Amino acid sequence: KLDLFANVVHVKSLPGYQTRHNNLDLVIIREQTEGEYSSLEHEVGAARDPTWPRAVPGQGRSPPALPAQPPSPSAGALGRPGGSAHAGFSPAPCPQLVQNPYQFDVLVMPNLYGNIVDNLAAGLVGGAGVVPGESYSAEYAVFELGARHPFAQAVGRNIANPTAMLLSASNMLRHLNLEFHSNLISDAVKKVIKGGKVRTRDLGGYCTTSDFVKSVIDNLHPHYGP
């Protein structure tokens, strides 16, 4: 077993794609080896792995100093009301995320509710097809989609959005200290989406998965200078 106890999802608005809440930038950390899915109580602390600071992108972010999560639909949160960070528990994270997601910087969630919040937050920036995720143990890191959607009707039809998988690959390269190559991929993906001409159906476009990937490849240009 890989013991991937910490799932990290960075929910960030895509440049050029308008949603109800724009300029979102928050991180959801979910404990995923205990809780309701495994019939184990919530015992693991939020940040037992020394790799976790690297998993949370952005300047000025730090893990909230929280006790182990209680067996209730609450979220440990590092928020920023009034511009100053604070740690605490949010009894109703889902309604608060929909109404005012800007109040959250980092959400630390137990297993079941973290799964719910991951999918909800993904919907705020464009859906499961655009949010990358990563899971960590003390020894391993796995990079995959940040939100779960079976989307069975897309199988074999070349219509799925590959953005989340491409950004996950970019995050994997960054984790391996291949920053230049990571930025090549993420910059190309964001440029294609911002251009607005090549988008899959879930983003209001008509292109196929292959069309999108080809456009990303065509935009894999390194940036030199400022």
Image (cartoon, rainbow, N blue to C red):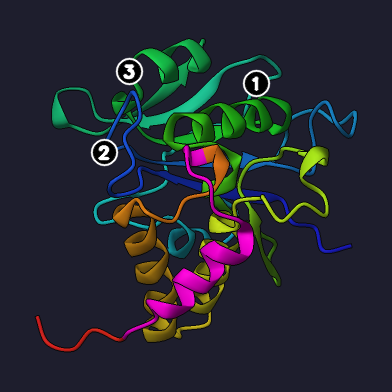
Q: Please report whichever mark, 1 or 3, sits nearer to the chain's N-terminal start.
A: 1
Where is residue 114 drawn, in percent x and y? 63, 31
Where is residue 109 drawn, in percent x and y? 59, 32
Going by the numbered disc 2, the residue's amino acid type is Asn
Q: Please report whichever mark, 3 or 2, sits nearer to the chain's N-terminal start.
A: 2
Which of the two discs, 3 and 2, sits closer to the camera?
2
Q: Quadrant of residue 185?
A: bottom left
Going by the numbered disc 3, the residue's amino acid type is Asn
Q: Residues within 10 Å of mark 3 (few under 14, many from 20)?
A: few
Could one spot residue 51 in this view of the protein?
A: no
Q: Residues within 10 Å of mark 1 (few under 14, many from 20)?
A: some
What residue span does the magenta drawing correspond to? 203-221
Residue under the image location 52 percent in, 36 percent down:
122
Q: Please report whichever mark, 2 or 1, sits nearer to the chain's N-terminal start.
A: 2
Residue 34 highlighted magenta (yes or no) = no
Q: Is residue 84 left or right of residue 161?
A: left
Q: Secondary structure at mark 3?
A: loop
Tell me the quarter of the image containing the C terminus: bottom left
- According to the picture, the residue beneath numbered tag 2 turns out to be 23
Going by the numbered disc 1, the residue's amino acid type is Pro
Which of the two discs, 1 and 3, sits closer to the camera?
3
Name the residue nearer the viewer: 184 or 120. 184
Q: Secondary structure at mark 2?
A: loop
79 over 13 or under it: above or below: above
Distance from the alpha carbon under mark 2 to that under mark 1: 31 Å
Name the residue nearer the viewer: 102 or 204. 204
Give the tally of numbered discs. 3
Q: Quadrant of residue 128?
A: top right
